[in-house]
Image (tube, grey):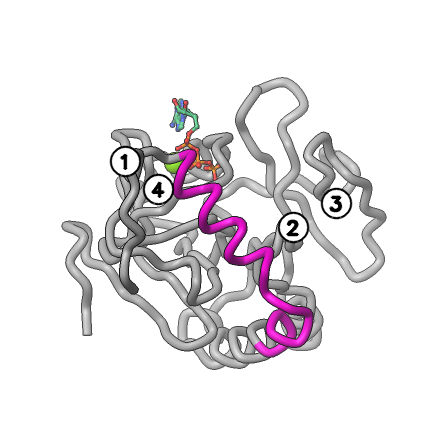
Amino acid sequence: MQQPQSADSNDRAYWRRLIRSRRQALSAPEQRAASDALCAQLLALPECRQANRIGLYLANDGELNLAPLAQALWARGCQLFLPVLHPFAAGHLLMLGYHCDSPLRPNRFGIPEPHLDVRQVAPLASLDLLLCPLVAFDDAGNRLGMGGGFYDRTLAGWQQSRPSQPLPIGIAHDCQRVDALPHALWDVPLPQILTPSRLYHFNPDGSQQG
Ligand SMILES: Nc1ncnc2c1ncn2[C@@H]1O[C@H](COP(=O)(O)OP(=O)(O)OP(=O)(O)O)[C@@H](O)[C@H]1O
Ligand SMILES: [Mg+2]
């Protein structure tokens, strides 16, 4: 995709504004088609077929809607988890069990999340797969989020753990791809990113497979 020229094109805020407005501009039929295509692809992925415990997110701000996927995964017998803002550790997430009848309420960002019940908290490493929302991604697997650092903190060190679990897969609309994003030391790049049209695989050095 041709990059727009801008004096502040290295600025993270610039990319967030640009790509957020791009995905917010998707129509309801475009969103539905994107969600259907992505869910079909994800359900067919070997990494998903082998997964029992899957973390996902509830769409906000034009993010790709995973609600139909959640239904299909429950039907498969998978256990699902949603991120909840940590009540004490600022900037951190907890993963809580998500059931079809889980009561949800909006957090301070307006994103629905399960009630904080300690019995439902799952250690991150007990998940097989973590589907990560993002604002923008680039050709090296760099990920730009909404700016809270929540997923960076959650995934800090995941690659060093053995076995490296969960496998994080970024989920995005095709219009969220850019050639190259500014990135910082704390930004955790993703090994795989799935869009409605294709799966991107990245090596640890940022080169693309396939
Ligand atoms: N592992 C970490 N430990 C401490 N602070 C961190 C860590 N990761 C990110 N941060 C802090 O979080 C702030 C926001 O980070 P960043 O701009 O990369 O957010 P983001 O990746 O867009 O958001 P998110 O991860 O929530 O989608 C930064 O100021 C950064 O210092
Ligand atoms: Mg980041």
Give x and y (percent) for residue 195: 44, 68
- Distance of mark 1 from mark 2, alpha carbons? 29 Å
Choose top left, top right, bottom left or bottom right for residue 12: top left
191 relative position to 126: left or right: left
Total marks drawn? 4
| Residue at image location 68% in from the left, 70% down from the top | 28
Q: Which residue is under mark 4? A: 158
Q: Which residue is under mark 1? A: 7
- Distance of mark 3 from mark 1, alpha carbons? 37 Å
Give the camera-side residue of 125 and 94: 94
53 relative position to 128: left or right: right
Local SS, label 4 = loop
- Residue 73, compared with residue 135, is above or below; it is below
Foreground: disc 1 or disc 4: 1
Specify whether residue 175 is painted magenta.
Answer: no
Local SS, label 1 = loop
Circle 2 packing at 10 Å, graded few (<14), some (14-19), many (20+), is some
- Distance of mark 2 from mark 3, alpha carbons? 9 Å
Q: Is mark 4 within 8 Å of ligand 1?
A: no
Decide which of tag 1 and tag 4 comes sooner along the chain: 1
Circle 1 packing at 10 Å, graded few (<14), some (14-19), many (20+), is few
41 relative position to 187: left or right: right
Residue 112 numbered mark, or none: 3
Give x and y (percent) for residue 29: 66, 76
- Work out which quarter of the rendered image holds the C terminus and state it: bottom left
Chief secondary structure of the magenta span?
Answer: helix
Q: Which residues, given as a range, are shown in magenta?
A: 13-33
| Residue at image location 31% in from the left, 30% down from the top | 186
Foreground: disc 3 or disc 4: 3
Decide which of tag 1 and tag 2 comes sooner along the chain: 1
